[in-house]
Structures are given as structure tokens and as C-alpha cells.
Amino acid sequence: VANLKGTIKLDGVQLGLVGEIIKLFKQKGSRPMAMNFLRASEEHLKQHCIDLKDHPFFPGLVKYMNSGLIMVMVGEGLNVVKTGRVMLGETNPGDSKRGTIRGDFCIQVGRNSTHGSDSVKSADKEISLWFKPEELVDYKSCAHDWVYE
Ligand code: IDP
Ligand code: MG
């Protein structure tokens, strides 16, 4: 069982995908622990994307992510980081299968609607970047015993 930090990017919010994406994660058994809508500062987004800082698209990515509302969420479930990445599809929506979020809802790489942590380590780092510990609510889902054996 591990945590996922997921972000619905500006285009995902603008295209009205927030409810759909929450639904898909809930459907696959992930237990929501925290969610927030916000406009993130460029500084905060640079921290979030720090591993990409040497790529030519980095300034554009940060500027675009800073230009409006995003939604960040944390969910918990068995292998949820790995499963979450499968649910997102490939980085480039053009390479993503139908049935994935990017495959079904997106067209271009710079407008792929969602971010998902790529490892438990980066999820932990990203969770602490976006949420205070007391904002993560731990509880037992009533579906738990029917989803897990
Ligand atoms: P990921 O989101 O699938 O983990 P990363 O390689 O971590 O992919 O890149 C982060 C984000 O940067 C991508 O989701 C995409 O929005 C953007 N990005 C990646 N490669 C390109 C590119 O070649 N052009 C424009 N944007 C890109
Ligand atoms: Mg990534």
C-alpha cells in the first residue's frame, strides 16, 4: 500500500475532467486522503518539476501550470503509484492506449491533463511539497474489506 500524489493540470481543470479523473481513481479502489484546488506559484511548480529543469520545455511547462487553477490530490491503495501511471497512459497522449486518461481525453504532450508520481519516493516528496501532514486524513474506507482479500 502506497500513496499517490496526482495533479490535475490546468487543461484538465479547464476541460472539466476533474470529476471524471477522481471517479476513475475511486473506481480503481484508491482511497482519497486529501484534495486541493489552487493556483500554484512559479516557484512552487519549479520545485515540483525540478527533475525536468534542464529540458527546453521546462520554462513553458512552469509558466503554463502557473497560469490558472490546478487540482492536487493524494490517494492511497495497493500499488497505487504504479497503477496510477498505467491509468494515466504514456507521457505523450499520441502513444497512450484508449482506456487511459491521456489516451481518452488528450492530444498533445504539453497538454496531457494530469501528473502522476513516478515512484513511491517521488510521491512522498511531492506529497510533502503540496500538503501539510495534518491535511492528510487517515481513515478506513467502508469498501476496504470488499476490495482487499
Ligand atoms: P510524465 O508526466 O509522464 O511523468 P515527464 O517526463 O515527467 O512525463 O514530463 C513531465 C511533463 O512535462 C509531461 O507530463 C508533459 O506535460 C511535459 N513534457 C514532457 N515532454 C515534453 C515535450 O517534449 N514537450 C512539451 N512538454 C513535455
Ligand atoms: Mg514525471
Image: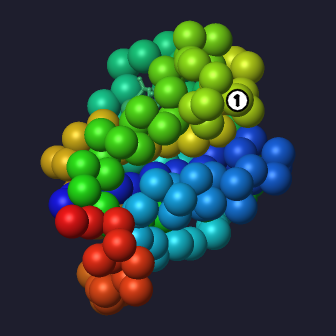
Q: Nearer the viewer, residue 72 or 141?
A: 141
Q: Position of residue 57 (x, y in %)?
A: 54, 19
- Residue hosting label 1: 104
Position of 141 compared to 93: left or right?
A: left
- Mark 1 surroundings: few (<14), some (14-19) or many (≥20) residues within 10 A: some
Q: Secondary structure at mark 1?
A: helix
Q: Nearer the viewer, residue 107 or 144?
A: 144
Name the residue: 57% across, 19% down: 97
Question: Looking at numbered disc 1 in the image, what kind of residue is underneath it?
Answer: Asp
* Residue 122 in sight from this viewpoint: no
Q: Is residue 92 above or below residue 52?
A: above
Rendering quarter of residue 105 = top right
Q: Position of residue 94 (x, y in %)?
A: 64, 11
Q: Residue furthest right?
A: 15
The quadrant of the rendered image in which ligand 2 is seen is top left
Q: Position of residue 84 (x, y in %)?
A: 41, 44
Q: Position of residue 81 (x, y in %)?
A: 31, 46
Q: Nearer the viewer, residue 3 or 68?
A: 3
Name the residue: 40% across, 71% down: 31
Quadrant for the N terminus in the image: bottom left
* Residue 113 in sight from this viewpoint: yes
Rendering quarter of residue 70 = bottom right
Name the residue: 43% across, 16% down: 55
Task: Give the colouring mode of the picture.
Answer: rainbow
